[in-house]
Amino acid sequence: MFAVGSGPRALGQALVSPGSAPASRLNDQGVFQLFLAGRRIGSEKFEIQSTADQTTAKAETQFEIEKEEKPVLIKTSSSLILNSQLAPLTYSWSMKSPQASSLEADFRSKPAKLRYRTVTGEADERDFSLLPDIVLIDTNAFHHFELLAARYRLTSGGKQVFRAFVPQDALPGELSVEGKGKETVQIRGLSEKLQHLVVTTELAQIDLWLDDQHHLQHVLIGTAQLEALRAR
């Protein structure tokens, strides 16, 4: 569900219960350095801005993978717009290199409209009957976990279960989020006390650490040896 890769694949669909209170405003920007098995492979530059009515999250990501024993640089961009309850309204994603592909999703319509353009230039258009309130986390979009943490704060705490929609993934998946309290961790060579959340999917456990401003500092997907560490 969450692993280094690229390009649209099949679609999934999912549902969650409505949030219990309006989302507090989210404003953040920064850069995550991406690591695979301890080796730096790329970066994600992101910006999250919000008003009373909606939140916009944008990112530019680049990372290097091995293909046929040769390094390949993947460059992607994404833009997610959510309502005040952090449910998605629209989402767009594009891969700029080594080949071009893209997707556009509109969750405001019923059924939801999803439009893909593959690396071969073919269009794949599909409609899905989705409830309006879903959790969207796309593959390799690490800043989406900060939005998930904000969504979790709308609940009563404890262990909360959601259905996730991953636009680039072939399968829908259930995930849970559970708070583990504050922990002292080493980050950027310093000891910091950060809030620890554990996200569990059918395929992996994802550990998140956030500061007192609810800004995501560290993402660890241990089974994939994949890590995002905030640089600034």
Image (cartoon, rainbow, N blue to C red):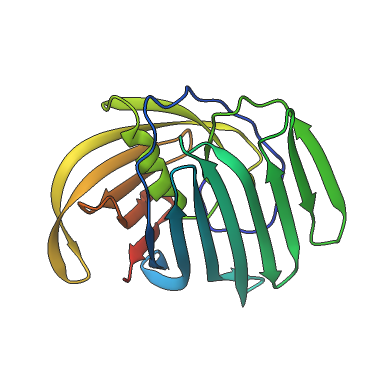
The answer to whether residue 218 is above or below residue 65 is above
Residue ID at (46%, 64%) = 46
Seen in the image, is 189 located left or right of residue 65?
Answer: left
Where in the figure is residue 139, as x and y percent of width and height? 55, 51
Foreground residue among 77 and 70: 77
Residue ID at (70%, 73%) = 98
- In terms of image quadrants, where is residue 231? bottom left
- In terms of image quadrants, where is residue 216? bottom left
Residue lying farthest bottom?
70
Seen in the image, is 98 located left or right of residue 221?
Answer: right
The answer to whether residue 70 of the structure is visible from this angle is no
Where in the figure is residue 218, as x and y percent of width and height? 31, 57
Report the label total.
0
Residue ID at (35%, 54%) = 219
Residue ID at (44%, 56%) = 49
Foreground residue among 93 and 225: 93
Position of the C terminus by quadrant: bottom left
Residue lying farthest top?
17
- In terms of image quadrants, where is residue 148? top left
The answer to whether residue 131 is above or below residue 221 is above
Residue lying farthest front?
52
Foreground residue among 79 and 207: 79
The answer to whether residue 61 of the structure is visible from this angle is yes
The answer to whether residue 222 is above or below residue 227 is above
Where in the figure is residue 39, as x and y percent of width and height? 40, 71
Where in the figure is residue 183, as x and y percent of width and height? 14, 48
